[in-house]
Amino acid sequence: MRSGRLHARATTFDRLLKPVHSWIWGNVERRVQKLLRFGEIEIDGGRDILRAAELTSDPVLRRLYLEHAIDEFRHGLMFRQRAGSVLRELPLRSNRTFQLDWPSAGGHGLDDLQIEKETDGSLLAFLHLSEKAAASRFTIYRDVMQHDPGTRAIFAEILNDERFHMNYTLTHLVRVAPERHRRHLWRARLSRLWKGYLRLATALASAMGALILTIQYFTVLPPFAWLAKRAARKESPGWFPISSERNGSLRRQY
Ligand SMILES: [Fe+2]
Ligand SMILES: [Fe+2]
């Protein structure tokens, strides 16, 4: 197993959120959802990196990308298998009808990537930051997983690979863009920040929409319901004769 040259530490932001992560992972059903979601993210990321291996003209990077893609596929399978094991350990009385789209604070964020538009430099900068973020997040997940040694071991193993990814991407970014690697990193940082803002704004807009609709439901609908009930009370019950003008033969629709 590889060990990283740089030892990623969890960021202050991730450390501050540790109680939240602890609460989220503490629930076994949420844990299964998150593991499944992570499995999906890792496999998608692996697919993107495989595409990068096809597109690069740098033979060293191609080999590293292939190795990287294999790692991400393996991580995806590890997460899925673990989700399956945790699910099988769930007591039968447990309510398994949970939704699979529990919002997850992802690891890599490789879903934002459009490989065809990237150069080796910009891709390596993006990958470096993504792997660094994943390593930070997985450090916290490993630490809060005291109650689940199986899942904790998976995070510890994957963390080791993420550190390797974080390191090789930086090393080769400096190699392929010795003059411009800082600029690539800053652009990637700004791009991640912007995409993070967009995600936050979308989530906020969705929450606001739900809130406004709920308020409307309780303030706008009741008067209509009251008017409908009042009109219903005025109606005489049962069948009653209608006027002769409206009582023609049924030869036409209206
Ligand atoms: Fe990974
Ligand atoms: Fe990775």
Image (tube, rainbow, N blue to C red):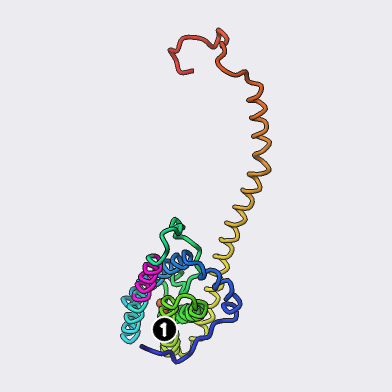
Residue 111, located in which quarter of the rendered image? bottom left
In the image: residue 65, left or right of residue 140 = left
Q: From which residue to which does the magenta span run? A: 74-87
Viewer can see residue 121:
no
- 105 over 53 or under it: above or below: above
Residue 116, located in which quarter of the rendered image? bottom left
Residue 54, located in which quarter of the rendered image? bottom left
Please check the rendered image and state whether residue 83 is part of the magenta-colored stretch, yes or no: yes
Would you name the residue on which mark 1 appears?
165
Viewer can see residue 144:
yes
Residue 231 position in % (x across, y down): 65, 25
- For the N terminus, give its image quadrant: bottom left
Q: How many marks?
A: 1
Residue 93 position in % (x across, y down): 44, 58
Q: Is mark 1 within 8 Å of ligand 2?
A: yes
**Residue found 45% across the figure and 13% down from its top:** 250
Between 21 and 118, the one lying in front of the other is: 21
Between 203 and 60, the one lying in front of the other is: 203
Q: Residue furthest top?
A: 244
In the image: residue 81, left or right of residue 156 = left
**Residue found 49% across the figure and 89% down from its top:** 7
Residue 8 position in % (x across, y down): 50, 86
**Residue found 44% across the figure and 15% down from its top:** 252
CA neighbours of label 1 inside 10 A, class few (<14), some (14 to 19), many (20+): many
Q: Secondary structure at mark 1?
A: helix
Give the amino acid type for the residue marked by disc 1 in the picture.
His
Please check the rendered image and state whether residue 41 is part of the magenta-colored stretch, yes or no: no
Magenta residues, dominant SS class = helix
Residue 156 position in % (x across, y down): 43, 82
